Image (tube, rainbow, N blue to C red):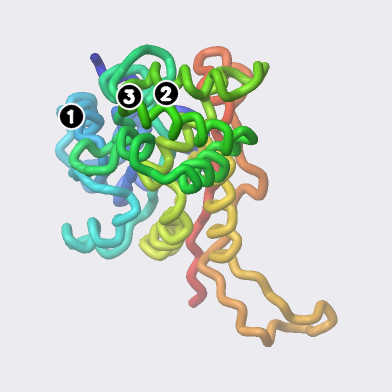
């Protein structure tokens, strides 16, 4: 299957990065290079783009999409390790970083990846196929309590206990091997809902667990900010409330907050700041974009600018 992914909030992200022609930029979730192509088109021959992705199929698609450009380096890795990745290739600071979080359209639509509750495919959900943990292990080997907790935490699913219980009952007879088997169990566990397919939240939760999408995110955001040059920008697109919460919290902490009494003429608390939040409210997709790409509905873009005091 061809790697297709419509870049979300494309123009808003490119504008947010405030690209310098001779700058160094990192796309930490390059995917099919939808955003990266626009970034590299704005760079001079002295500019440079680093593309990172843990999905090797995404990297192959990015390589094809960006063929002809020489000022580019593609790396198989996890954006959570961005500090070590840049260190390894001898780059200390960069002018901008983009993280487009979540799962791509290709990963959802490619049946062999097992991300979707529609179809009858092998349970997998790994973005990085070289890792051991897959949806199969989570569904068939996690204890009932742990399974219920992650479905509730990452899927915000009110029927998490019932779903986990029924999964554990079903797997006693035989392992749950396909997306359809899992979706059927969930469907029988959840009362009729107008909020999309009943398996949507549980599948999302398992995917987040398999790919460890939330836990390292706060520290990753701070690492990215620390890697920026003065005036550099960090753009992060989230699709899930927990992702957005982690990004928002990291941005606020990086911006710093003075705790001095308001009547003091100057700050004495020693509050430190790494920069400023560019948009207090997240940028969301326009009506025009939603007509073209319904998957942009939950997308939120938050921008941070590094500002070091002299």
Kindly identify which residue carries mark 2. 182
Q: Are marks 1 and 2 in contact (CB under 8 Å)?
A: no
**Can the viewer see residue 18 in this picture?**
no
Instruction: State the quadrant of the N terminus.
Output: top left
User: In the image, what residue occupies the spot 57% across and 30% down?
Assistant: 298
Spatial distance from mark 1 to mark 3, Cα to Cα? 20 Å
Q: Which mark is residue 143?
A: none
Kindly identify which residue carries mark 1. 60
Front residue of 112/265: it is: 112
Q: Are marks 2 and 3 in contact (CB under 8 Å)?
A: no
- Indicate the secondary structure of the residue bearing disc 1: helix
Q: Earlier in the sequence, mark 1 or mark 2?
A: 1
Kindly identify which residue carries mark 3. 114
Q: Are marks 1 and 3 in contact (CB under 8 Å)?
A: no
- Indicate the secondary structure of the residue bearing disc 2: helix
Where does the image place residue 223, in percent across and percent down from the top left? Answer: 39, 62
Where does the image place residue 3, in percent across and percent down from the top left? Answer: 27, 20
- Frontmost of labels 1 and 3 is 3
Q: Is residue 5 above or below residue 230?
A: above
Q: Earlier in the sequence, mark 1 or mark 3?
A: 1
């Amino acid at each position: 299957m061809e790697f297709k992914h419509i870049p979300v909030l494309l123009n808003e992200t490119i504008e947010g990065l405030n690209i310098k022609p001779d700058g160094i930029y990192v796309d930490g979730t390059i995917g099919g290079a939808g955003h990266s192509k626009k970034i590299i088109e704005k760079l001079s021959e002295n500019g440079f783009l680093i593309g990172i992705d843990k999905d090797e199929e995404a990297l192959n698609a990015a390589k094809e999409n960006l063929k002809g450009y020489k000022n580019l380096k593609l790396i198989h890795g996890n954006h959570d390790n961005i500090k070590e990745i840049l260190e390894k290739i001898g780059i200390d600071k960069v002018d901008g970083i983009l993280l487009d979080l979540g799962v791509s359209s290709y990963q959802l639509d490619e049946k062999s990846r097992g991300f979707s509750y529609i179809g009858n495919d092998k349970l997998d959900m790994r973005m990085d196929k070289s890792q051991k943990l897959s949806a199969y292990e989570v569904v068939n080997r996690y204890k009932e309590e742990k399974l219920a907790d992650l479905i509730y935490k990452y899927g915000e699913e009110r029927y998490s206990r019932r779903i986990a219980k029924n999964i554990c009952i079903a797997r006693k007879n035989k392992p749950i091997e396909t997306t359809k088997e899992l979706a059927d169990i969930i469907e029988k566990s959840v009362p009729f809902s107008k909020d999309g397919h009943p398996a949507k939240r549980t599948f999302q939760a398992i995917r987040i667990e398999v790919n460890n999408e939330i836990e390292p995110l706060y520290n990753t955001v701070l690492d990215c900010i620390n890697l920026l040059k003065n005036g550099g920008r960090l753009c992060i697109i989230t699709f899930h409330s927990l992702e957005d919460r982690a990004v928002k919290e990291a941005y606020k902490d990086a911006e710093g907050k003075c705790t001095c009494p308001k009547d003091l003429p100057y700050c004495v608390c020693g509050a430190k700041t790494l920069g400023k939040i560019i948009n207090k409210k997240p940028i969301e997709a326009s009506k025009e974009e939603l007509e073209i790409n319904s998957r942009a509905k939950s997308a939120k873009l938050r921008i941070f600018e590094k500002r070091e005091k002299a």
